[in-house]
Amino acid sequence: MIDVDLKEAESIAVVRPESVTGLTESDIEKLRDTIDGYLKDHETLRGLVIVADQFPGWANFKAFTSHFEFVRDHQKHIRKVAVVSDSPFMSAAPHLIDHFVSAKVRTFAADDLEEAERWAATEDPRAGHFEVLDGFPDDVIAFRAEGEITREDYEETLIPLAQEKIKAHKKIKLLYWIGEGFKSFSAGAMWDDARFGMTHLGDFSKIAVVSDVEWVRMSVKAFAPLMPASMQVFHNAEIDDAKQWISEG
């Protein structure tokens, strides 16, 4: 069985899987019905707090697929996932989940439930964003990364615009400016970046990366020989040169 405690005032749900034989399809339906009932009147749920002594598993394959479908359908509507457990497997779960969901995921010790609930209920400001740069030819997409770039930034800004440009042009060009306001990439953002790059390898004719971040510069130079596009790396002080180069035919 599964216990779902919806705390509407805090906009969080505390979930306790209590079955020793694994989650069932009816358990997942109970969770889905509770969350969907809340989402009818709210855009998002701030947090999902999972409290488990150990990984419960699934009673059968149908329960597994139902759980997968729940994650797929709700991951963009839940801002945070807190995993409360002393189990080594459950404690490692956030490192795996973060690659596949939009939510921010964090683990807490079993005796830190109150702290987990506070964290899940806190509305965080957006950590970062992509700023779309204007003044370029129509076949160019240009971005500046600000703050911490997350999976959400890729899926809401960069990927849709790139796909729109690819439909309109045979080949497109990309100016990617990782300037002084940049802080980091989340694991989910790095996964989306790699997946998008592999999917659209042949759609770019030129790529300009502008950054003083040494690991970024080294990574681009390492992968440049494998890319079909022409690639150049510029320092922040060379942004005007990068803009000129990416705009040339």
Image (tube, helix red, strand yellow):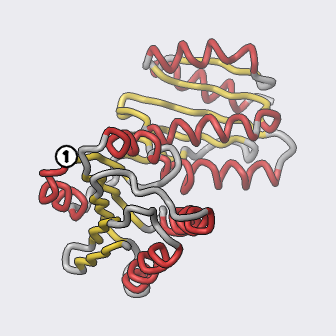
Position in image of residue 240 (x %, y %): 55, 25
Residue at the disc numbered 1: 109
**Which residue is at the front of the view, 185 or 116?**
116
For mark 1, does the 10 Å Cα neighbourhood hold few (<14), some (14 to 19), or many (20 or more) residues?
some
- Name the residue rendered at 79%, 31% in the picture: 205
Amino acid type at image mark 1: Ala
Q: At x 20% / y 56%, what residue is drawn?
A: 116
**Residue lying furthest right in this view?**
170
Residue sitting farthest toward the front:
21
Q: Position of residue 34 (x, y in %)?
A: 39, 81
Numbered disc 1: secondary structure: loop
Residue at coordinates 75% horizontally, 22% vertically from top-left? 227
Q: Is residue 147 visible?
A: no
Question: Quadrant where the N terminus lies?
Answer: bottom left
Image: 150 above or below 12:
above
Q: Image quadrant of residue 125?
A: bottom left
Residue 10 as seen in the image, left or right of residue 166:
left
Residue 215 falls left or right of residue 114: right
